[in-house]
Amino acid sequence: MNEIFLNFPDNRLKNSLTNDILLKSNSLEYHKTLEEYAETPLYDLKNLSRELNVGKIYVKDESKRFNLNAFKGLGASYAVHKALSLYPNISVFCTATDGNHGRAVAWSAAKHNKKAVIYVPKQTTDARIKAIADHGSEVIQLDLNYEDTCQYASNISKKMNWTLIQDTSWINYEEIPAYIMSGYLTHLREMEDSINTLNNPGIDIIFLQCGVGSWPATCIWYYINRYFKKKPKIVLVEPDESSGVLQSLLSNKRITPKGNLNTIMAGLNCGIPSMSGWEIIKNGCDAAISISDEYAKKAIRTLYYPIKDDERVISGESGAAGLGGLIKCLEVNKFNVLREHIGLNSKSKILFINTEGNTDPENFKSIISSN
């Protein structure tokens, strides 16, 4: 299976409903009204950058977002807010999830005293299910994979007249996913006082872990919209066995990944890429790669056991995948073509976003104890 795709994007944003909604987003202003809001930290891991022989390594730590241990609350809360502003009489929200998004929807619904019904695929762990249920939602596990669980949630929402808050889009379902994407803009705008400077980015390369594609597409949209051709190089990272975006780029069309879907990176274990996310990704990413679970584990341990006075970062299997991608790029000889393509060298300033903390505590404990 091919592990790499080099893209030559035109860095243009097409007119669409998603683009219009993103342009009008006031998510940061909305999130600042929430009592749980606090800007998440941006760490400069100086010693790790010297260890890996690159210029800078920055990590934006979303594990500290809203006490949810993941960034997904940004998108879900904004989408629920927008849905209720349009339709105040909504009684039930529904979604499909592999963990973090479902918890975010459950939390957001509870803040508005609304019911949430959350469907999870067959491989979802008990710890992730409990984290969702703790917000008072009904969690139903199906004997289906992620993609089929999304379809089930969509069908039953129509049947029951529930409001679907899904973080992937398809034909005739674009508005809510666009509001979710709009919510994600908050953590990028928080960095406008530091590395996302006005005229030129303070970073050269971003490694973004990629599941169904909505979140990395938001990041790509932001950097194109802010910098156009001066945007940083963007590399997408997926699991070897669930690389829907990489395989879609190789096929030049959206496809369901051809893998066994067996990976510890649960949040990235998705199906066919989001329709609107795909349109942005193919026009704006510079490369896509896949990594094994071992690289995710190595990245988790690298962040958990910091060098000297670097900050310790608690990162889950999906949250650490971006760093796992960099480590693979630096270690694997055949990736020299990728290193040249994105200009990865000893002076490169690199950004990762830690999208989740230890959302599966037992697995996390096992990984860090095997160091």
Image: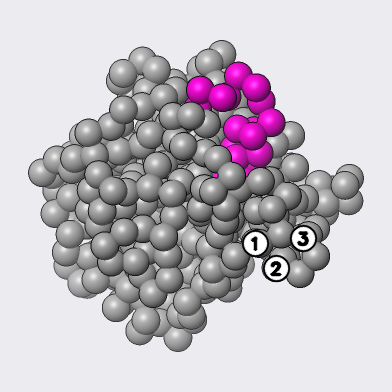
What percent of the width, then of the height, locates residue 272? 40, 29
Q: CA distance from mark 2 to mark 1?
A: 7 Å
Q: What amino acid is labelled 3 in the image?
A: Pro
Query: Which stretch is magenta?
Result: 322-338
Q: Are marks 3 and 1 in contact (CB under 8 Å)?
A: yes
Q: Is residue 278 left or right of residue 48?
A: left
What percent of the width, then of the height, locates residue 65? 53, 70
Nearer the N terminus, badge 2 or badge 1?
1
Residue 88 in view, yes or no: yes
Residue lying at the far front in this picture: please name it. 347
Q: Are marks 2 and 3 in contact (CB under 8 Å)?
A: yes
Q: What amino acid is labelled 1 in the image?
A: Leu
Q: Are marks 2 and 1 in contact (CB under 8 Å)?
A: yes
Residue bearing mark 1: 45
Q: Is residue 337 above or below residue 33?
A: above
Q: Which mark is residue 311?
A: 2
Q: Quadrant of the N terminus?
A: top right
Q: What residue sits 46% from the left and 46% below the top?
A: 205
Q: Nearer the viewer, residue 326 or 240?
A: 326
Q: Which mark is residue 306?
A: 3
Q: What residue sits 42% from the left and 76% below the top?
A: 111
Crowd band around label 3 with a 10 angstrom C-alpha radius: few (<14), some (14–19), many (20+): some
Crowd band around label 2 with a 10 angstrom C-alpha radius: few (<14), some (14–19), many (20+): some
Q: What residue sits 14% from the left and 48% below the top?
A: 17
Q: Nearer the viewer, residue 5 or 203?
A: 203
Q: What residue sits 28% from the left and 66% below the top?
A: 198
Q: Is residue 107 above or below residue 145?
A: below
In the figure, residue 277 lies in which quadrant? top left
